[in-house]
């Protein structure tokens, strides 16, 4: 007779805290997606083809 074993995993508070900065960067990128793509294509005074950062 076989038994099903159930295992639950959870992140520690330390690891949950580590997820906050990347989540913030993802939110920022989502909110500014149009401006980032525009800058990449040369809009808003950008030269295009390069990084939208400085």
Image (spheres, rainbow, N blue to C red):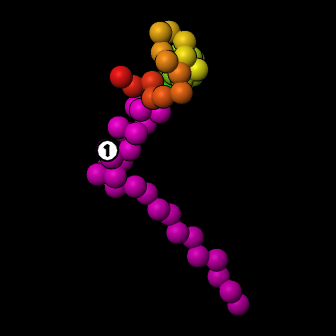
Within 10 Å of the Cα at label 1, are there few (<14), some (14-19), or many (20+) other Cα atoms? few
In which quadrant is the C terminus drawn?
A: top left
Asked whether residue 2 appears in the rendered view, the answer is: yes
- Residue 15 part of the magenta-drawn span: yes
Residue 37 falls in which quadrant of the image?
Answer: top right
Q: Residue at x 52, y 69 (%)?
A: 7
Front residue of 53 and 49: 49
- Residue 37 part of the magenta-drawn span: no
In which quadrant is the N terminus drawn?
A: bottom right
The x, y position of residue 44, in whole percent, is 50, 9
Give the side of residue 5 with respect to residue 16, left or right: right
Give the side of residue 2 with respect to residue 17, left or right: right
The x, y position of residue 45, in whole percent, is 47, 9
Q: Residue at x 29, y 51 (%)?
A: 14
Q: Residue at x 48, y 28 (%)?
A: 50
Front residue of 2 and 18: 18
Mark 1 residue element: helix
* Residue with the most extreme right position: 1
* Residue with the most extreme top position: 44
* Residue with the most extreme left position: 14
The x, y position of residue 22, in whole percent, is 40, 39
Front residue of 45 and 34: 45
Q: Which residues are magenta?
A: 1-27
Q: Which residue is mark 1?
A: 17
């Amino acid at each position: 007779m076989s038994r099903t074993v159930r295992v639950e995993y959870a992140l520690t508070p330390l690891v949950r805290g580590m997820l906050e900065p990347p989540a913030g960067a993802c939110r920022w990128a989502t909110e500014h997606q149009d401006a980032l793509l525009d800058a990449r294509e040369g809009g808003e005074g950008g030269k295009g083809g390069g990084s939208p950062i400085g």
